[in-house]
Amino acid sequence: GENVEQHPSTLSVQEGDSAVIKCTYSDSASNYFPWYKQELGKGPQLIIDIRSNVGEKKDQRIAVTLNKTAKHFSLHITETQPEDSAVYFCAASTPLNRDDKIIFGKGTRLHILP
Amino acid sequence: EAQVTQNPRYLITVTGKKLTVTCSQNMNHEYMSWYRQDPGLGLRQIYYSMNVEVTDKGDVPEGYKVSRKEKRNFPLILESPSPNQTSLYFCASSLTGTYYEQYFGPGTRLTVT
């Protein structure tokens, strides 16, 4: 079945540096790729998403890139700040299929070091 | 305020005692879903519903039931809880499906002894 691999599982970066989290997916029919941020004690919250007709999307310090040929997509956070410390999840969905499921990666715990 | 609410937030119960976790959204969303979150396993979809009276299995449906009698509510039922269902549960909703942003509830931490 559909699988989403996410790396790394833990990432520590110095404040002000960039962080990159990578995901690969198995179903070539997947066409929607959201990224969620989960702060301690809270539910995940969407921070950025990309659809399959776009190769890159940017929102201030956050960007996502998609390579459909290689079936991977990445989250880039520039100029990291302490409030970026959280767990990040990537996901892939194929909503045009009969089964409107979504598969999440296992998550990346990002630590921003002072 | 647009939100997804879950109750209870914390629950400790014993093996075999039926329980229900409620979920409600006030955004008139058609799609609702339940997830469980376990260390090292991320978020796994249990059940989802694309509209009233329409439910379908996610990746880990065993031991769970759901119902969607009203658009705003999507309760998760554990008929006979077991210790391996100890987990953090999230309800989520979105406009019409997984192609749109999902709004997550605050989570329910369940412990089955």
Image (cartoon, coloured by chain):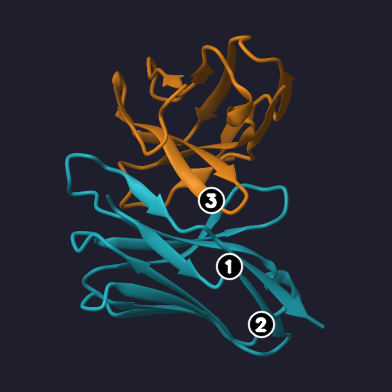
Chain colours: A cyan, B orange
The chain letter under disc 1 is: A
The chain letter under disc 2 is: A
Q: Looking at the picture, which amino acid does disc 3 mark?
A: Leu
Residue behind mark 1: A9
Q: Residue at x 53, y 17 (%)?
A: B78
The chain letter under disc 3 is: B
Task: Tell me residue A13's x, y (percent).
Answer: 69, 83
The part of the image, by quadrant, that contains residue A79 is bottom right
Residue behind mark 3: B41
Up-down relation of residue A112 to residue B77 (above or below)? below
Q: Residue furthest right?
A: A114
Q: Residue at x 70, y 30 (%)?
A: B9
Q: Residues within 10 Å of mark 3 (few under 14, many from 20)?
A: few
Q: Looking at the picture, which amino acid does disc 2 mark?
A: Thr
Q: Quote the CA–CA distance across marks 1 and 2.
A: 18 Å
Q: Residue at x 29, y 53 (%)?
A: A2
Q: Element type at marker 2?
A: loop
